C-alpha cells in the first residue's frame, strides 16, 4: 500500500495537479500495528501503511516509559529506509521523529545514525539506554507527500525509530524566515510552568517543555483570560501564557538561558510576553531585549489577555552570546517572559529533489516490478544515500546515471523509462525479463553499458542498439534471442554506398539485355 501511494504521489506532483487533501494530523507508532488513543487525546496508528522494510521490536516491560515508546522499527539492511506519508496538503508542516532505544536488543549499545526528510539532511540521531529523544523540523512542502528516512552511518549500529508525527501549520506561521529554508527546533519552552504542554492545549501539537531560569528569577502565574484570538502570527497556546518568570526586584534584569552550542550557528527566535494578572493604575511594566549587553529591541509592554511576540528572523549566535531582559527607566515592575522558541537555520536551502524525468522513469519501473516498490524517499538525495540499485551524479538537481538491477527478481516486460536520458549504465542481468528488447534503449543518448544477459528476451537485437557507437552490449544467456538477426537490419557502411549502387545498376542492365536477346 505504501509503495502504491508513493507512485501516485510522485506522478501527481510531476503533473502539478491540485491537491484535494485536508490538513494532516498523522501520528504513527512505529513497530506497532494496533491503533489507540493516548492520554492527550491523540489517535495513534501502526506503521504498516507507511513503510515496507525493517523489523518490529519491543522494549522490555522493565524499561517501558510510555505506550508509544514501547515499540520501534529497526532497519538492518539497505543504504537508507524511508517512511512515506502521502496525500499531504501542500503548505507549512511540522514533522517530529522520536527515538527510545530502551536496550530493546539487550546489547546496551545505543546506536548513532542519520536522519533525513524529503531528500534533505536533518540531523545525526544520538540515543541512550534510558533517555528518549525527539527531533522536529518545520518547513514548506515542495510536493504533496513527505518522506522521513534513516541511514546507517556506523558499522553494526542499526537505525531505528519509535514514533513519527506530522502536523499541518497555518501558512502565515513562522514566515519570518524564507520558505526556502527549514527550521530545526532547538528549544521550545513555557516559563514558570511545572508541566509541559502539547495537544490539546496546543492544537498544532507543539511540545512546550518546562523552561529553565537562572538565579534572580522566580515563576509567577495568574488569572489571565483569553477571550479573543491572539494578535500574533505564530499562535502560542493560551496555556503557556498563563505562567511566566520575572525578576525578584523592579530594577533587576533576567538573563535568559539559551543553551547555544560552542560553534556559531544561525538561529530564528520567538519570545512571547503576556501579563498573567491585571496591573494596578500605578503599575507599569516595560523592558527591552539586550543582546551581548546592547539594546536589541524597542520597549516591550506585555498586555493582559493578549500577547506580544518579538522575533529575530536570523542572527548568528554561540555559547558566548547572551540575551537578557532589561527594565526601562520608567518601569515600576521587573521584566517578564512567558515562552520562547528557538530554531536553527541551516546553510543549505531545501532541495528540489532528484530530476523529475528520472523520478518519472523510476516510478515506471516500480509500477511494473513489485520487488522495487519498497524503496521510497528521494532516490538520489541526500548524497551519498541513494537507493541501493541506482547511482547518481552530484549536480545540484541530481540525475540517475546507472540502474544496477542484477538479480533483483524482475519478471515480465521492461517498461518505457526513456525519460531517464542521463543513464550511462543499465545492468538487468540475471532476472526473468522477457519479450523483445525495447527499441527505446538505443535512443538513450549517454548509454555506454547495457547488460541484458541471462534473461528471457526474444526476437532480434534492435538496430538502434546493434549500430550504436561506443556501446558495450551484452545479450548472452537469452535462448530466444536471435543474435545474428541484427545483421540484416544493419545499414550499409557509408563508404560502400556508391559501389553497391553501381553493382545494382550493372545487374539490372544485364537482366534487361538478356531479356531482349531471348525475345
Image: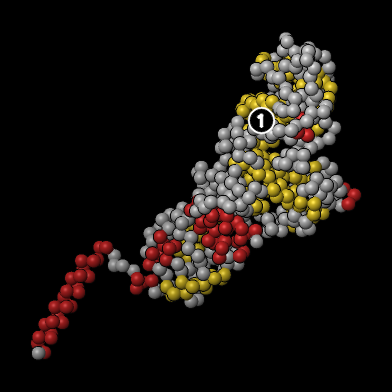
Rendered location of residue 349, percent (x, y): 56, 37
Can the viewer see residue 260 in this picture?
Answer: no
Picture quarter with the C terminus: bottom left
Can the viewer see residue 172 in this picture?
Answer: yes
Task: Please tell me how crowded label 1 is: few (under 14), some (14-19), or many (20+) other residues with Cα within 10 Å.
Answer: some
Is residue 358 toward the left or the right of residue 311 in the image?
A: left
Residue at the image position 13 percent from the left and 86 percent from the top: 515
> Going by the picture, which residue comes out furthest to the bottom?
519
Residue at the image position 80 percent from the left and 24 percent from the top: 277
Is residue 231 toward the left or the right of residue 493 in the image?
A: right
Q: Is residue 395 above or below residue 305?
A: below
Residue at the image position 62 percent from the left and 41 percent from the top: 92
Q: Is residue 505 above or below residue 517?
A: above
Is residue 204 toward the left or the right of residue 11 in the image?
A: right
Between 384 and 482, the residue placed more toward the observer is: 384
Residue under label 1, please give it: 232
Rendering quarter of residue 34: bottom right
Between 109 and 143, the residue placed more toward the observer is: 143
Amino acid at each position: 500500500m505504501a509503495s502504491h501511494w508513493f507512485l501516485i504521489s510522485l506522478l501527481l506532483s510531476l503533473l502539478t495537479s491540485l491537491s484535494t487533501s485536508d490538513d494532516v494530523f498523522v501520528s504513527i507508532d512505529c513497530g506497532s500495528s494496533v491503533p489507540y488513543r493516548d492520554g492527550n487525546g491523540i489517535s495513534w496508528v501502526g506503521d504498516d501503511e507507511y513503510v515496507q522494510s525493517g523489523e518490529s521490536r519491543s522494549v522490555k516491560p522493565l524499561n517501558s516509559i510510555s505506550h508509544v515508546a514501547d515499540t520501534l522499527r529497526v532497519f538492518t539492511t539497505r543504504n537508507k529506509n524511508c517512511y512515506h506519508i502521502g496525500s499531504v496538503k501542500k503548505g507549512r508542516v511540522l514533522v517530529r521523529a522520536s527515538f527510545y532505544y530502551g536496550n530493546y536488543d539487550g546489547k546496551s549499545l545505543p546506536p548513532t545514525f542519520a536522519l533525513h526528510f524529503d531528500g534533505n539532511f536533518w540531523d545525526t540521531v544520538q540515543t541512550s539506554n534510558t533517555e528518549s529523544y525527539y527531533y522536529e523540523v518545520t518547513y514548506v512542502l515542495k510536493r504533496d507527500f513527505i518522506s522521513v528516512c534513516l541511514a546507517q552511518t556506523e558499522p553494526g549500529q542499526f537505525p531505528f525509530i519509535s514514533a513519527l508525527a506530522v502536523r499541518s501549520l497555518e501558512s502565515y506561521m513562522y514566515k519570518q524566515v524564507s520558505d526556502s529554508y527549514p527550521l530545526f527546533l532547538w528549544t521550545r519552552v513555557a516559563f514558570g510552568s511545572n508541566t509541559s504542554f502539547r495537544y490539546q492545549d496546543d492544537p498544532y501539537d507543539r511540545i512546550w517543555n518546562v523552561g529553565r531560569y537562572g538565579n534572580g528569577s522566580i515563576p509567577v502565574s495568574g488569572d489571565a483570560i483569553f477571550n479573543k484570538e491572539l494578535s500574533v502570527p505564530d499562535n502560542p497556546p493560551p496555556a503557556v501564557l498563563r505562567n511566566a518568570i520575572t525578576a525578584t526586584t523592579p530594577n533587576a534584569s533576567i538573563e535568559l538561558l539559551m543553551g547555544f552550542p560552542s560553534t556559531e550557528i544561525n538561529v530564528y527566535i520567538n519570545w512571547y510576553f503576556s501579563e498573567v494578572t491585571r496591573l494596578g493604575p500605578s503599575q507599569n511594566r516595560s523592558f527591552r531585549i539586550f543582546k551581548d549587553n546592547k539594546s536589541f529591541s524597542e520597549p516591550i509592554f506585555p498586555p493582559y489577555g493578549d500577547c506580544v511576540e518579538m522575533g529575530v528572523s536570523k542572527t548568528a549566535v554561540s555559547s558566548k552570546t547572551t540575551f537578557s531582559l532589561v527594565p526601562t527607566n520608567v518601569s515600576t515592575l521587573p521584566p517578564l517572559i512567558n515562552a520562547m522558541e528557538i530554531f536553527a537555520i541551516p546553510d543549505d536551502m531545501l532541495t528540489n529533489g532528484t530530476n523529475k524525468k528520472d523520478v518519472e522513469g523510476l516510478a515506471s519501473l516500480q509500477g511494473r516490478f513489485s520487488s522495487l516498490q519498497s524503496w521510497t524517499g528521494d532516490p538520489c538525495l541526500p548524497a551519498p544515500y541513494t537507493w541501493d540499485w541506482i547511482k547518481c551524479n552530484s549536480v545540484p538537481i541530481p540525475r540517475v546515471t546507472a540502474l544496477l538491477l542484477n538479480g533483483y527478481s524482475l519478471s515480465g516486460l521492461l517498461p518505457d523509462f526513456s525519460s531517464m536520458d542521463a543513464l550511462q549504465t543499465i545492468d538487468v542481468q540475471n532476472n526473468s525479463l522477457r519479450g523483445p528488447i525495447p527499441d527505446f534503449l538505443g535512443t538513450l543518448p549517454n548509454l555506454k553499458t547495457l547488460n541484458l544477459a541471462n534473461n528471457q528476451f526474444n526476437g532480434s537485437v534492435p538496430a538502434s542498439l546493434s549500430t550504436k557507437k561506443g556501446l558495450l552490449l551484452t545479450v548472452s544467456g537469452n535462448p530466444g534471442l536471435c543474435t545474428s538477426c541484427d545483421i540484416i537490419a544493419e545499414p550499409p557502411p557509408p563508404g560502400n554506398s556508391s559501389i553497391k549502387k553501381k553493382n545494382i545498376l550493372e545487374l539490372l542492365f544485364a537482366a534487361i539485355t538478356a531479356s531482349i536477346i531471348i525475345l
